[in-house]
């Protein structure tokens, strides 16, 4: 399996990008491209695409996936990771051996605690309330369909405003992906236990928010 990996990164008060990069390497993935939203220190030995000035969470995600597909259109899988996630060792080989149905639109390598279940792969809730954008993997044809879909193409200029969306088109990556799945009868899958963990203390998209560190991936 050929997997193209990208990391969306921002200027964090407590940087964790180095840990994410090292963890991806230990998990078996090839060197990722960094999609930096703004200017800040980035390891010099990696390929980097910089948004300057910064564009926001959803635009950076959209541009990252677009560039990944444009650079490596024959990849079997496109994995977009946030810069505050660490992975279990050997995840690449485990993911490569997985068999997903044809209607699988996206796979989340991060499983929130509320979704823990019997060991293995499980369907993941889709729609506006989909919870998890830390590590999303799109099968090749699904990535092309996602980028060409009217819902995702128009989200930046016509994002709804509701309890799930701010209405500015800059946030809620998980909700955009989840709703794309629902609109197109695509399934989302995740794994229990989680194949990755969120380690960030501060949020780029929600300044002032402080999350809990929960590092259990091994």
Image: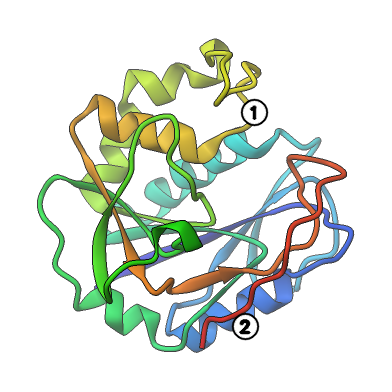
Vertically, is 206 above or below 20?
Answer: above
| Rendering coords of residue 105 (x, y %) | 25, 45
Q: Nearer the viewer, residue 197 or 61?
A: 197
| Rendering coords of residue 104 (x, y %) | 20, 49
Residue 214 is marked as: none
Vertically, is 149 above or below 18?
Answer: above
| Rendering coords of residue 18 (x, y %) | 72, 76
For the residues marked 1 and 2, what is the alpha-carbon distance in whole angstroms?
28 Å
- Viewer can see residue 5: yes
Q: Nearer the viewer, residue 207 or 116?
A: 116
State the residue position of label 1.
170
Q: Nearer the viewer, residue 168 or 46?
A: 168
Viewed as shown, does residue 128 lie left or right of 46?
A: left
Helix, strand or loop under label 1: loop
Residue shown at the point (52%, 59%) measured from the top left = 6
Residue shown at the point (78%, 39%) measured from the top left = 52
Q: Residues within 10 Å of mark 1 (few under 14, many from 20)?
A: many
- Viewer can see residue 62: no
Q: Residues within 10 Å of mark 2 (few under 14, many from 20)?
A: some
Q: Nearer the viewer, residue 100 or 146?
A: 100
Give the quarter of the figure containing the N terminus.
bottom left
Viewed as shown, does residue 137 lie left or right of 1?
A: right
State the residue position of label 2.
22
| Rendering coords of residue 202 (x, y %) | 80, 55
Question: Which of the 4 image quarters holds residue 181?
Answer: top left
Residue shown at the point (39%, 87%) measured from the top left = 90
Helix, strand or loop under label 2: helix
């Amino acid at each position: 399996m050929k997997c193209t990996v990208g990391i969306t990164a921002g200027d964090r008060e407590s940087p964790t990008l180095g840990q994410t990069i090292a963890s991806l390497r230990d998990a078996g993935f090839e060197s990722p491209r960094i999609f930096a939203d703004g200017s800040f220190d980035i390891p010099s030995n990696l390929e980097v695409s910089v948004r300057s000035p910064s564009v926001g969470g959803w635009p950076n995600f959209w541009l990252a996936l677009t560039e990944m597909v444009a650079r490596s259109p024959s990849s079997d899988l496109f994995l977009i990771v946030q810069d505050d996630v660490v992975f279990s060792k050997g995840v690449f080989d485990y993911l490569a051996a997985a068999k997903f149905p044809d209607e699988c639109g996206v796979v989340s390598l991060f499983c929130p605690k509320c979704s823990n279940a019997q060991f293995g792969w499980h369907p993941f809730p889709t729609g506006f309330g989909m919870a998890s954008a830390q590590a999303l993997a799109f099968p090749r044809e699904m990535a092309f369909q996602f980028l060409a879909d009217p819902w995702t193409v128009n989200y930046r200029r016509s994002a709804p405003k509701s309890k799930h969306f701010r209405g500015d088109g800059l946030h809620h990556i998980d909700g955009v992906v989840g709703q794309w799945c629902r609109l197109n009868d695509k399934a989302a899958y995740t794994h229990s236990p989680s194949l990755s963990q969120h380690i960030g203390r501060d949020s780029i998209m929600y300044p002032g928010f402080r999350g809990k560190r929960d590092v259990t991936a091994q």
